[in-house]
Image (spheres, rainbow, N blue to C red):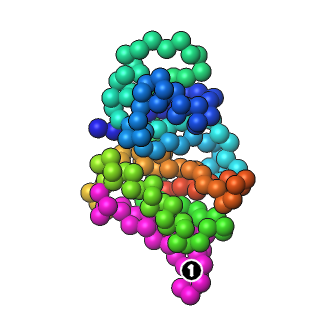
Amino acid sequence: MYVTVIIFSHWTLAKIFEFLTDYLEADQTDILLANIEKNGDKEPKEPKETNRTLILVKKSLLDKYQQEDHLNVDFRMEEFRLSSKHYPAKNQTDNFYIQIPQVLSSVDAEILVQEKMKVFVYCGLISAEEYMIRIPLVSRITGGHRGFMLLDFNEEVDIKTRALIKALIQNSFFYSDLEKIHYLPVFWSLKK
């Protein structure tokens, strides 16, 4: 069984993974997805990192951490809890609007989001049939997109699951080359 944990630390992702693998003896199947929480959803080009990291891990890893004493003052891990800020407002739907940077083709953008969604399928949070990615195109010949994609869920996926997925993929990053980091801002779609 997998749970989402929140880690409070100023460590790099690499150092967090090193702690989880060396100190807690986690393996590759224990840690599925990590995302540093960021502030600044209004300005998606340069969101500011916080000291909070959301990670999808096996429950046994969290249990092991909680059973041991930890002297390190810059690392705390606990189960993540959704709050009201994680749910859609009254003028929003329960599906996602994801901005696509122009450096990504529609095919690459779909692959990027599909890879993240496969993690949720793998851990049993949703099934592959319960979501659909739609990318409005400018041209079917070139594959040029309009700068966004829609991620729709079937009725079977409850709002809590959708909110958890959004929290885990919100402003996740990718590299367009070795130096440039880009983010994928995820918003609740607006009602028409």
Q: Quadrant of the N terminus?
A: top left
Q: Quadrant of residue 106?
A: bottom right
Q: Does the magenta stretch include residue 130?
A: yes
The residue at 65%/39% (across/down) is 49
Residue 132 position, x and y percent, is 38, 66
- Image: magenta residue range: 127-153
Q: Is residue 119 left or right of residue 8?
A: left
Residue 111 position, x and y percent, is 49, 65
Name the residue at the left extreme: 156
Q: In which quarter of the image is residue 184?
A: bottom right
Q: In this view of the protein, which residue sits in the foreground, 18 or 119?
A: 18
Q: In this view of the protein, which residue sits in the foreground, 23 or 46?
A: 23
The residue at 33%/53% (across/down) is 121
Residue 127 position, x and y percent, is 29, 57
Q: Is residue 70 magenta?
A: no
Q: In this view, does 162 lie above or below 76?
A: below
Q: Name the residue under label 1.
A: 143
Name the residue at the right extreme: 179
Q: In this view of the protein, which residue sits in the foreground, 160 or 4?
A: 4
Q: Is residue 78 above or below residue 38?
A: above
Count of all numbered marks drawn on residues in the image: 1
Q: Can see residue 3?
A: no
The residue at 63%/42% (across/down) is 39
Q: In this view, does 29 lie above or below 117?
A: above
Dot 1 alpha-carbon crowd within 10 angstroms: few under 14, some 14 to 19, many 20 or more: some
- Give the amino acid at mark 1: Gly
